[in-house]
């Protein structure tokens, strides 16, 4: 029993060590870049984890050596216009579930409407968004504009778009649960 508890604590510690603050992530990224590591960055709400999220994040991780996930704070999610009852899962729950995925290296919470300032601090080698974004969009007021693209490309990085998995979205899952189907 004690051996099982120690293993559980060890795994929980591993999960917790992936959740970092801004100062820590900047220091980590500087160390990683000094070692020649390719840093990949993506962001989102990831309110109710589903197959579409997992496939997107796994493919994102495949684009480099280290995956940093910037996670919208609860207040930031509310400002995204996803609904009065969102997020369903609070930040600590979303962080814990996402940090348990082996291919996510670090998770950082952000409270702004966009992760622009965070991208500017990190300057990742690769910026990734889902297929509902358009890498050719230049109008920052459009929903499909990729925030931080200018920063990444100015630093010789690349922007990638990964196709979404049909039939999977948090909003559709919530609607399905509400309808009882």
Image (cartoon, grey):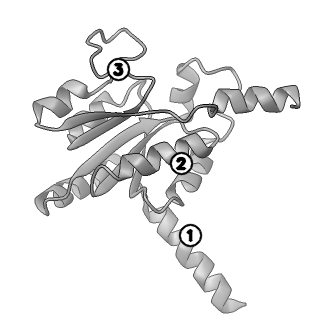
Mark 3–mark 1 Cα distance, whole angstroms, equals 37 Å
* Of the image marks 2 and 3, the number of the one nearer the N terminus: 2
* Of the image marks 3 and 1, the number of the one nearer the N terminus: 1
Q: As drawn, is 179 to the left or to the right of 3?
A: right
Q: As drawn, is 103 to the left or to the right of 172?
A: left
Q: Residue furthest right?
A: 180
Screen quadrant of the C terminus: top right
Mark 2–mark 3 Cα distance, whole angstroms, equals 21 Å
Residue 126 percent location from the top left of the image? 25, 41
Q: As drawn, is 142 to the left or to the right of 157?
A: right
User: Disc 2 designates what residue?
Assistant: 54
Which circle, 2 or 1, is nearer the viewer?
A: 2
* Of the image marks 2 and 1, the number of the one nearer the N terminus: 1
Mark 2–mark 1 Cα distance, whole angstroms, equals 20 Å
Q: Residues within 10 Å of mark 3 (few under 14, many from 20)?
A: some
User: Disc 1 designates what residue?
Assistant: 12
Which circle, 3 or 1, is nearer the viewer?
A: 3
Q: In the depicted view, which residue is nearer to us: 94 or 170?
A: 170
Picture layout, residue 121 above or below residue 134 = below
User: Disc 3 designates what residue?
Assistant: 134
Give the residue drawn at x 19%, y 58%: 37
Screen quadrant of the N terminus: bottom right
Residue 26 percent location from the top left of the image? 24, 50
Give the residue drawn at x 43%, y 14%: 143
């Amino acid at each position: 029993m004690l051996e099982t508890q120690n293993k559980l604590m060890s795994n929980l510690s591993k999960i917790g060590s992936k959740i970092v603050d801004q100062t820590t992530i900047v220091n980590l990224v500087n160390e990683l870049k000094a070692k020649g590591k390719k840093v990949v960055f993506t962001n989102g709400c990831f309110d109710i984890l589903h197959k579409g999220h997992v496939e997107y994040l796994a493919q994102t991780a495949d684009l480099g050596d280290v995956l940093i996930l910037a996670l919208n704070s609860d207040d930031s999610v509310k400002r995204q216009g996803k609904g009065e009852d969102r997020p369903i899962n609070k930040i600590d729950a979303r962080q814990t579930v996402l940090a348990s995925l082996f291919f996510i290296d670090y998770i950082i919470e952000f409270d702004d409407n966009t992760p622009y300032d965070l991208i500017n601090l990190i300057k990742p080698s690769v910026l990734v968004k889902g297929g509902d974004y358009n890498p050719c969009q230049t109008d920052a007021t459009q929903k499909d504009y990729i925030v931080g693209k200018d920063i990444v490309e100015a630093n010789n990085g690349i922007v990638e778009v990964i196709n979404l998995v049909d039939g999977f979205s948090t909003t559709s899952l919530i609607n399905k649960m509400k309808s009882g189907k």
